[in-house]
Amino acid sequence: MDFPPEIPLYERIYLVIRHVPAGQVATYGQIAGLVDGCTARMVGYALAALGPNTDVPWQRVINSQGKISPRSGGIGSALQRQILEAEGIAFDARGKVDLRKFGWPGFEVE
DNA sequence: CCTATGACTGGTC
DNA sequence: TGACCAGCCATAG
């Protein structure tokens, strides 16, 4: 990914997440791998810094286990699941997403 | 400038 | 399968 150096790392992460199409989910590690000089934790922290009214599809970002990350606080994860289901994402009995089917293949262009 | 703090990950037990 | 531990680094105060 080649982003302008003037924009903060968080912004780059947000941009990548905005590139995730509806009906697909990406893992923190996946996002981190697309943003140069970014780690999975950075992605998590970046999302944690998001406000209530944002245009970033944060709900499409889940952990490597295909599960929704339990945020600090409580509710939100439930809402996240609802949004994903509304987009066509299927959850198994354990509440996990099949990354083999709904996993974001990533960017075609690097 | 320094400290505290987090939506994670991978490897062990 | 599930719990625990230690790296990881940008942002806010």
Image (spheres, coloured by chain):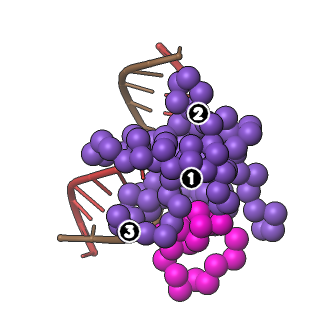
Chain colours: A purple, B red, C brown
Mark 2: few, some, or many residues within 10 Å (few <14, many ≥20)? some
Can residue A69 be seen here? The reply is: yes
- The amino acid type found where label 1 is placed reads Arg
Residue drawn where x is 38% and y is 57% of the image = A48
The label on residue A92 is none
* C-alpha distance separating marks 2 and 3: 26 Å
Residue carrying label 1: A60
Q: State the quadrant of the N terminus of chain A.
A: bottom right
Q: Nearer the viewer, residue A23 or A56?
A: A23
Q: What stretch is highlighted in magenta?
A: A1-19
- Looking at the rendering, which quadrant does residue A74 occupy? top left
Element marked by disc 3: loop
- The amino acid type found where label 2 is placed reads Phe
Residue A50 on image: x %, y %? 39, 65
Residue drawn where x is 64% and y is 79% of the image = A3
Dot placed on the residue nearer the N-terminal end, 2 or 3:
3
Element marked by disc 1: helix
Mark 1: few, some, or many residues within 10 Å (few <14, many ≥20)? many
Residue carrying label 3: A53
How many marks on residues? 3
Q: Mark 2 lies on which chain?
A: A
Residue carrying label 2: A91
Residue A23 on image: x %, y %? 66, 51
Q: Mark 1 lies on which chain?
A: A
Q: Mark 3 lies on which chain?
A: A
Residue drawn where x is 52% and y is 30% of the image = A95
Residue A65 on image: x %, y %? 58, 34
